[in-house]
C-alpha cells in the first residue's frame, strides 16, 4: 500500500511539473505565464511548502462494498543542486496515524529514497527517468493552448495570483506514466484510461512563481475493474509553495544513510506470490463449496 501511495504522489507531482512547461506569447496568456514560471523555476535553487492529499478507494465485488479513506499532509522542502526532496508527513488510514520522514536524492540515473517511521529507517533505489522521457512529458500540455486563464486574478493574502486550469485525460495520464519508463501502471494493475485529472495552478503575479498547484483525479463513475473487483478512485492533492531560495541545503540524517538497502524487486515478487496464493486459496474454497 505504501508503494502505491508513493506512486500516486509521484504521479501527481509529475502532472504538476507538466503544467510548468510550454512556450509563451507577447501578451498575458496561459502560454506566456507558463513560459515565465518555467523560466523562473529553472533558476530556483530551492523551495519550501506544504502538501495535503485526500484519497478514497471504494471496492465492490458485486455483493459487498468497502470504502477506504486515506489522508496525508505535512511540510516539504527541496533543493535543485543537489536534487534532494524532504517531506515530513502524517498519514491517516484505517483509524491509524503514522508519522513519516522521507528524503529522496537524485544522482544521475539513480534515485535513492530514505523513509523513517518511528525511528526506524529503510532505503530503496530506483532508476531515474531519463532526460528524453521527462522532456516528452511536456507534449501533454503542448504549448499551453489547452489551458484556461481566469479573467480575474485571485487574492492570496495581500498578493494577486493568476488562476490557470486544465484537464488531463486518462489516455494522457497513461502516456505520461509510460513515458517515465518502468512498469508503474502494470504494477498497480490499473487502467488509467477511465480516469482524468483536473489541474488548478495559481501563480503569484508579482514574482511569476507558483503559489499552489492542486490536482483532482477521479474515474468516470463506473470504476476500474481489477480481477473481478470494481474499484472507484478519487484523490485530491494540494501543494502550496511558501518560500523560494530560502534554504541553502538539505542534510540527510546519518541513520538514514546507514539504513540497509531493500531489494524492491524481491519485495514486489514476494507480494505477487502472496497475491497469487491468496487468489488460489479463494478459488479452492469456492470449488469446495
Image (tube, rainbow, N blue to C red):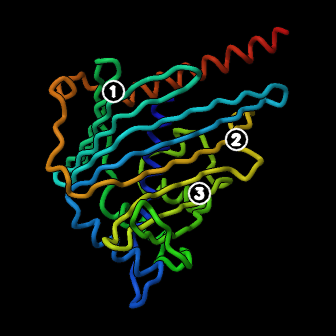
Q: Residue furthest front?
A: 158
Is disc 3 surrounded by few (<14), some (14 to 19) or many (20+) residues within 10 Å? many
Q: Is residue 37 left or right of residue 231?
A: left
Name the residue beneath numbered marker 3.
197
Q: Is residue 192 left or right of residue 12?
A: right
User: Which type of secondary structure does the marked residue at label 3 adopt?
Assistant: strand
Q: Viewer-proximal residue, 206 or 12?
A: 206
Q: Viewer-proximal residue, 183 or 165?
A: 165
* Residue 2 is at least partly visible in this image: yes
Name the residue beneath numbered marker 1.
263
Q: Is residue 137 above or below residue 148?
A: above
Q: Is residue 4 above or below residue 243?
A: above
Name the residue beneath numbered marker 2.
232
Badge 1 vs badge 2, beta-carbon distance below 8 Å: no
Residue 249, horizontal then vertical, whole percent: 15, 46
Total marks placed: 3
Q: Residue at x 18, y 29 (%)?
A: 253
Q: Residue at x 31, y 71 (%)?
A: 207
Q: Quadrant of residue 42?
A: bottom left
Q: Which badge, 2 or 3, comes first in the chain's sequence?
A: 3
Amino acid at each position: 500500500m505504501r508503494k502505491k501511495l508513493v506512486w500516486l504522489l509521484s504521479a501527481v507531482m509529475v502532472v504538476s511539473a507538466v503544467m510548468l512547461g510550454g512556450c509563451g506569447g507577447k501578451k498575458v496568456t496561459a502560454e506566456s505565464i507558463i513560459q515565465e514560471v518555467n523560466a523562473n523555476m529553472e533558476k530556483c535553487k530551492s523551495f519550501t511548502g506544504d502538501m495535503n492529499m485526500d484519497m478514497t478507494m471504494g471496492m465492490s465485488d458485486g455483493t459487498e462494498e468497502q470504502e477506504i479513506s486515506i489522508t496525508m499532509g505535512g511540510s516539504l522542502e527541496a533543493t535543485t543542486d543537489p536534487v534532494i526532496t524532504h517531506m515530513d508527513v502524517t498519514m491517516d488510514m484505517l483509524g491509524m496515524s503514522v508519522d513519516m520522514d522521507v528524503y529522496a536524492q537524485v544522482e544521475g540515473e539513480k534515485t535513492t529514497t530514505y523513509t523513517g517511521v518511528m525511528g526506524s529507517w529503510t532505503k530503496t533505489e530506483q532508476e531515474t527517468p531519463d532526460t528524453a522521457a521527462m522532456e516528452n512529458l511536456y507534449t501533454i500540455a503542448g504549448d499551453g493552448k489547452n489551458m484556461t486563464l481566469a479573467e480575474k486574478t485571485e487574492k492570496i493574502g495581500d498578493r494577486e495570483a493568476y488562476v490557470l486550469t486544465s484537464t488531463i485525460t486518462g489516455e494522457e495520464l497513461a502516456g505520461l506514466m509510460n513515458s517515465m519508463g518502468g512498469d508503474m501502471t502494470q504494477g498497480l494493475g490499473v487502467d488509467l484510461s477511465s480516469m482524468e485529472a483536473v489541474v488548478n495552478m495559481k501563480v503569484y503575479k508579482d514574482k511569476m512563481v507558483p503559489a499552489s498547484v492542486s490536482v483532482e483525479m477521479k474515474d468516470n463513475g463506473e470504476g476500474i475493474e481489477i480481477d473481478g473487483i470494481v474499484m472507484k478512485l478519487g484523490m485530491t492533492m494540494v501543494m502550496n509553495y511558501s518560500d523560494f531560495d530560502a534554504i541553502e541545503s538539505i542534510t540527510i540524517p546519518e541513520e538514514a544513510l546507514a539504513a540497509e538497502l531493500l531489494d524492491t524487486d524481491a519485495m514486489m515478487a514476494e507480494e505477487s506470490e502472496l497475491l497469487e496464493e491468496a487468489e488460489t486459496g479463494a478459488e479452492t474454497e469456492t470449488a469446495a463449496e
